[in-house]
Each structure stands twice: as C-alpha cells, then as structure tokens.
C-alpha cells in the first residue's frame, strides 16, 4: 500500500437513498475540485473544511454525473489522518460506478484495496491494531452484544489493558536489566527481585488468560450461542425445536428413535443469534445405532451453553429423568426445564427443580413458546457481559498464547533458580508479542492478512 490517493464507495452495493464515496490521500482535494461545481460560491476544501457543500459532479467531458453533497477533511482531522473527501450521491450502483470511474479518469487517484482506509488510519496512528479489529466487528456484528463489545474495544478498552500489562512487564524487565548491566555498581537483592517478579507474573498470567478466554467466548458469540434441547425419547423435543424455529425442520413421529442425529439451526432471539440443537432421546438402555445417537446427543450437550430439558406433562417423572436433571445441573451454569404436552394433562403437577426455571409449554399449539424464548434469552444474558468478551483475531490470539508461554517459562526459570539473563530474555519475548498484538512491531504479512478481511471502502 502506497502513500498515494485512493477512492472507493464507503456504503454497500445496492440501491439506497444515499451512497457515500470516500477519497483519501494527498490529491483528495484536487480530485474533488476537478469534478465538483458548487451551487453557490462555496467550494469544499481547505477554505471551508468539514463543511458540507451542495452542488453537482461532472466528468472530464463536462457531462453531468449527479446532484451531490461534498465535504473535505484536511489532515490530520480525518478518519485516515490524511486529506480526505466524501461525496454523498444518490444510491444507485450505476451512478456510484460512474462517479468512481470519472474520478479515476482524472489520473489523480486509484481504487482502494480492501481495508486500506482503516490500514492508513492504523499506519498514521489514529487507531491501533485492536481498535482496527473493532471497526471490522462493528461492521459485521450480528447482535447487540457484539456491537457493544466492538464499541468498547474501539474506545480503547482492550488497548489500555494490553498496554497496562506491557508496562508491568517492562517494569520487571528494567529491574532485571539493572542487575544484568550494573552488577558491581548497584547493590540489588536478587532473590527479592526474583520473588517480586514471580508474584507479579502470576497476576499477569491470570489477566492474559482471562483475555484469551474472553476472545474464545466472543468467537462463540459470533457463531451463535448453542442451546441444546434434551430429554427422554418421545417427550416432544423435535416438536419443541420446530416450534422455536417457527417451521418444521425436524421429523416428528409417534415412535421413539425418529431423531438419530443432532439437528442444528440458527434462530435469532431478540438481539442474539442462537444455535438450537435438537438431540436424540437419552436412554441408558440404548443399543446399536441408538447408542451412537445418544453419544452424539451427549457431545452436543457438552458444546451447549444453555440446556432445555424437556419433560412430558402427561406422565410422571422417571428415575432416568431425575438422574439426567442432576447430571445437567452439575455440569451446566444454566438449565431450563420445559414441561411439554400440557394439553394432554388434566392437571400439571410440576416437580421441584431447585435453581432452574420451569416453563409449561405445548409445542403443538405454541402455548408457552414465547415464555421459553424469554427464559433462554435471559439465561444467555446472565452468562455473558461485555466485560467478559474480547475481540482478537486468530493471529492475535496466537500472539497472546505465545506471550503466556514465555511468562510460564519465566515462572519455571525462577522456581528452578535459573539465571537473571534467561528470565529477562523470556520477558522481552513476551513484551514483543504484546507489541505485535497492538501492531507496534510491524509485520507486513500479518497486517495485510488482517486488513484483507475488511470491505473495500473501509
């Protein structure tokens, strides 16, 4: 990527009331003034910065392109910290293409590469790498939770945490460097310093471990929160699954064993994407293919965050179901009990399920489905908060993992009584990893891979 002038639509392809075309680089003002004629005497440019001006765009031959608004942002007070211009035209893709093509014909600019505007913002120090990734999350977020995490990170929450950890490590490293470089000039209690380093590193390891776990959690949030629908055969799991989806996805039949594999489908509940999983009936006496189906069901349960245990209101609770409930509550943070087929019961005698929400439903006519959705949503919100989640792409996660490995080496070296030089070297490597998380140490291949995921106009 070069320090020339780039242009690209900043809004998605498709028809809309307004489209935005973005120009950035040293010739941004020249491109705008070459094509734009104001309706008044005011020209967008350094004389009138950050001011929207109404006018018309023309191509090199003098043909009218569109009626537009235009604004110029002089460096460094722009998204990229370069001279920038934005043109707001009618949102017809043909018009947008004609305007971009006419700008290219001036010979003053080229089409931007993917993510190049944000890459320039990063190179010019407006955002660090963690904030740049947050921009991508804000664009692609499919839930309010992801939006909130993206905004938090864009405001620098993660950057400050990584920088704080880095400064802590640099403090320990500087203490060790004094001992290494000036062993005779400065009297230092080496064993005391090493003990302080060991105590501090334990806290840093805990902070980085939480960060890594938060990144893994966020990946799961982006994919969809997994909710397993479980229970004995013929309690109506597949019917409930279909009712939650609002359409027939799983086969429903009177005989047990209809569901032999896990059936998954994504469903949006309010502002959260949920992966609903219909599982085979759980029974201890299962053999052959039924046994394989039960094993797959248990694997799905292990992947789930929330479990909906389905019971049949028309019969009494079995010992197997009681045992299953106890197993689930020991293994999961949140279990919801759905008592199904209430239309077949003269009266519903609800057993006691301590610490769990119990919902009466009829999958056949939809009774209680809304309440069950609400319980699932509440359970997810209780399990997750913005503070728990972190946006790290795969390469950044690997860097944090690497930093953790170096710090664990530090702990091992100190316990084994190894030299100060070895401890200091591992600390330096951990600091280097954290610098790369924020993009302070430039790795061109890494950066180009990350920014290639962006859209053209961002």
Image: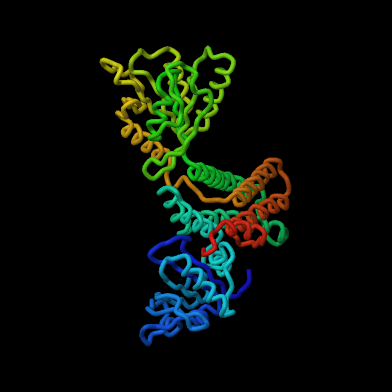
User: In the picture, which quadrant includes the N terminus?
Assistant: bottom right
Q: Quadrant of residue 306?
A: top left
Q: Please state which of residues 102 and 320 is positioned toward the viewer in this rendering.
A: 102
Vertical relation: 402 (above or below) 128: above
Question: Where is residue 124 shown, x and y percent of the image?
Answer: 56, 70
- Residue 175 seen in the current view: no
Question: Where is residue 367 shown, x and y percent of the image?
Answer: 30, 28
Vertical relation: 438 (above or below) 216: below
Vertical relation: 134 (above or below) 209: below
- Residue 336 seen in the current view: yes
> Is 192 left or right of 135, judged from the image as shown?
right
Question: Where is residue 260 shown, x and y percent of the image?
Answer: 53, 23
Name which residue lies at 58% across and 18% down: 289
Vertical relation: 119 (above or below) 50: above
Q: Please state which of residues 283 and 123 is positioned toward the viewer in this rendering.
A: 283
Q: Quadrant of residue 312?
A: top left
Q: Please state which of residues 432 and 235 is positioned toward the viewer in this rendering.
A: 235
Q: Quadrant of residue 335?
A: top left
User: Most extreme residue toward the bottom, as rendered?
Assistant: 41
């Amino acid at each position: 990527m070069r320090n020339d002038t780039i242009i690209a639509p900043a809004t998605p392809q498709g028809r809309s009331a307004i489209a935005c075309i973005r120009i950035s680089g040293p010739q941004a003002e020249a491109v705008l003034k070459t094509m734009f004629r104001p309706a008044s005497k005011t020209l967008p440019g350094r004389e009138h910065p950050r001011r929207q001006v109404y006018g018309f765009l023309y191509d090199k031959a003098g043909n009218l392109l569109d009626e537009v608004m235009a604004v110029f942002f002089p460096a460094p007070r722009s998204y990229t910290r370069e001279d920038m211009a934005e043109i707001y035209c009618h949102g017809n893709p043909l018009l947008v293409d004609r305007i971009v093509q006419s700008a290219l014909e001036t010979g003053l600019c080229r089409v931007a590469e993917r993510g190049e505007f944000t890459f320039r913002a990063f190179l010019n120090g407006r955002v660090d790498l963690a904030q740049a990734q947050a921009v991508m999350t804000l664009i692609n977020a499919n839930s309010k939770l992801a939006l909130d995490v993206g905004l938090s990170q864009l405001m620098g929450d993660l950057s400050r945490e990584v920088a704080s950890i880095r400064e802590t490590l640099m403090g320990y490293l500087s203490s060790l460097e004094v001992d290494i470089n000036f062993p005779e000039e400065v009297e230092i209690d080496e064993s005391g310093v090493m003990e302080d380093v060991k105590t501090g590193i334990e806290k840093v390891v805990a902070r980085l471990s939480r960060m890594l776990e938060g990144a893994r959690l966020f990946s799961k949030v982006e994919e969809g929160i997994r909710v397993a629908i479980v229970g004995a055969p013929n309690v109506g799991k597949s019917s409930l699954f279909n009712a939650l989806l609002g359409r027939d996805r799983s086969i429903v039949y009177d005989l047990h064993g209809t569901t032999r594999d896990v059936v998954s489908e994504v469903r949006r509940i309010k502002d959260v994407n949920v992966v609903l999983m219909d599982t085979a009936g759980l029974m201890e006496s299962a053999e052959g293919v039924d046994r394989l189906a039960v094993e797959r069901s248990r694997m799905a349960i292990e992947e789930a965050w929330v479990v909906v245990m389905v019971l049949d209101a028309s019969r009494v609770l079995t010992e197997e179901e009681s045992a299953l409930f106890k197993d689930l509550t020991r293994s999961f943070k949140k279990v919801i009990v759905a008592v199904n087929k209430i239309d077949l019961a003269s009266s519903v005698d609800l057993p006691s399920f301590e610490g769990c929400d119990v919902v009466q439903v009829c999958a056949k006519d939809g009774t209680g489905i809304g309440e069950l959705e609400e319980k699932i949503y509440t359970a997810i919100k209780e399990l997750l908060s913005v503070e728990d989640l972190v946006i790290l792409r795969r390469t950044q996660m690997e860097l944090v993992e690497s930093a953790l490995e170096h710090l664990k080496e530090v702990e091992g070296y100190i316990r084994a009584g190894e030299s100060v030089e070895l401890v200091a070297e591992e600390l330096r490597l951990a600091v280097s990893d954290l610098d790369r998380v924020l993009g302070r140490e430039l790795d061109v291949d890494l950066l180009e891979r990350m920014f290639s995921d962006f859209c053209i106009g961002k």
